[in-house]
Image: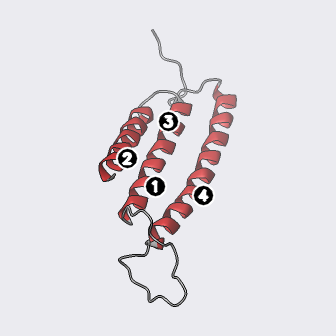
Amino acid sequence: MEIIVALGIGVLTGSGVWLLLRPRTFQVIIGLSLLSYAVNLFIFSTGGLRTAAAPVLERGVPGDLAVQADPVPQALVLTAIVIGFATTALFLVLLLAARGLTGTDHVDGKEQQR
């Protein structure tokens, strides 16, 4: 299971970096989103990948960290998802404003000469 998650993180990171290096603004925004997804998955995996672990304490049973899920990475990822959504929306508004002002969606503001 860990190797699949590690490969997924690697694919998301590689795709995000590749898209960040593209000349169009929309591709850069998608690359940033993929990188944020990779970081979220990495943070989530630091809590340990357990199956059938109870998320909260049960009544009458003493708490044991060996059988409980770690809530801190889950809370961090939830916060990062909200912040990532807000920054993606901000970047899309900036993309539309820059497209309206310059007439192009290239990162440097001008079309490439061929």
Which amino acid does the dot numbered 1 rest on? Answer: Asn
Name which residue lies at 53% across and 83% down. Answer: 58
Marks 1 and 4, how far apart at CA? 11 Å
Which amino acid does the dot numbered 2 rest on? Answer: Ile
Helix, strand or loop at disc 4? helix
Comparing 73 with 2, the one in front is 2
Residue marked by disc 1: 40
Neighbour class for label 4 at 10 Å: few (<14), some, many (≥20)? few
Residue marked by disc 3: 28
Comparing marks 3 and 4, which lies closer to the viewer? 4
Name which of mark 2 and mark 1 comes first in the sequence.
2
Marks 2 and 4, how far apart at CA? 19 Å
Comparing marks 1 and 3, which lies closer to the viewer? 1
Name which residue lies at 64% across and 47% down. Answer: 90
Q: Pointers 1 and 4 in contact (CB under 8 A)?
A: no
Q: Which mark is residue 82?
A: 4
Which amino acid does the dot numbered 4 rest on? Answer: Val
Marks 1 and 3, how far apart at CA? 18 Å
Neighbour class for label 2 at 10 Å: few (<14), some, many (≥20)? many
Marks 3 and 4, how far apart at CA? 19 Å
Residue marked by disc 2: 9
Which amino acid does the dot numbered 3 rest on? Answer: Val
Name which of mark 3 and mark 4 comes first in the sequence.
3
Helix, strand or loop at disc 2? helix
Name which of mark 2 and mark 4 comes first in the sequence.
2
Helix, strand or loop at disc 3? helix
